[in-house]
Image: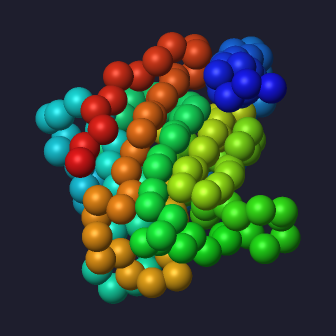
């Protein structure tokens, strides 16, 4: 299957899951972690960015200033010769990122690290409300602390609300 077809099938599936969930009438449990505004400029538009820890060998993927976030699809690239990503879930085959809370990962469509690339797609499931504010989308655990911030970057980010509509967001460097 071509990567173009695979990408669009995954995105279509995510939208279908989001739209199918819109008719739910039951109340879902609240997210386990609240949104934080630590990295947010509350007057600005939605952004997505990588934030390297100064103390730990990890990089967090943050979304800031978002409203009604329901699903996210991320593609990242990294220099495999400079970074070794540690698996966040040894119970599953392959290497995965640690899911965050923005959006709550009720359904994991794809969480895959391959040689030099990361593909992460999660969605909430209705009747959960969309995520508002700022928070961690996922965490990338590294073998060693990140010393070269250019060794990893966000290639593309698609944010979607509960109605399956795109949310405009800027990728911050």
Give the image location of residue 82, x and y in percent. 43, 72
Give the image location of residue 134, x and y in percent. 35, 47
In the figure, residue 133 lies in which quadrant? top left
The residue closer to the viewer here, 166 or 86, is 86
Q: Is residue 95 left or right of residue 49?
A: right
Please name the residue shown 67% across and 71% down the image: 87
Q: Residue furthest front?
A: 81
Looking at the rendered image, the quarter that the N terminus falls into is top right
Would you place residue 113 above or below residue 82 in this image? Answer: above
Would you place residue 36 above or below residue 108 in this image? Answer: below
Please name the residue shown 71% across and 43% down the image: 110
Would you place residue 148 above or below residue 18 in this image? Answer: below
Residue 103 visible in the current orientation: yes
Please name the residue shown 44% across and 61% down the image: 79
Would you place residue 53 above or below residue 75 in this image? Answer: below
The residue closer to the viewer here, 39 or 171, is 171
Please name the residue shown 71% across and 19% down the image: 5
Q: Is residue 62 left or right of residue 5?
A: left
In the figure, residue 128 lies in which quadrant? top right
Give the image location of residue 156, x and y in percent. 44, 34
Residue 127 visible in the current orientation: no
């Amino acid at each position: 299957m071509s990567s173009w077809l695979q990408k669009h099938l995954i995105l279509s599936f995510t939208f279908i899951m989001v739209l199918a969930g819109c008719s739910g009438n039951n109340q879902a449990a609240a997210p386990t972690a609240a949104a934080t505004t630590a990295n947010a400029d509350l007057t600005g538009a939605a952004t997505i960015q990588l934030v390297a820890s100064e103390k730990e060998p990890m990089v967090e993927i943050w979304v800031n200033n978002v409203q009604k976030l329901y699903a996210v699809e991320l593609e990242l690239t990294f220099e495999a010769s400079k970074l070794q990503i540690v698996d966040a879930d040894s119970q599953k085959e392959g290497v995965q990122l640690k899911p965050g809370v923005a959006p709550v990962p009720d359904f994991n469509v794809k969480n895959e690290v391959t040689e030099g690339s990361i593909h992460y797609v999660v969605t909430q499931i209705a009747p959960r409300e969309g995520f508002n504010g700022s928070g961690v989308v996922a965490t990338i655990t590294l073998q060693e602390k990140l010393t070269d911030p250019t060794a990893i970057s966000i290639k593309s980010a698609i944010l979607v609300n509960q109605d399956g509509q795109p949310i405009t967001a800027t990728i911050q460097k």
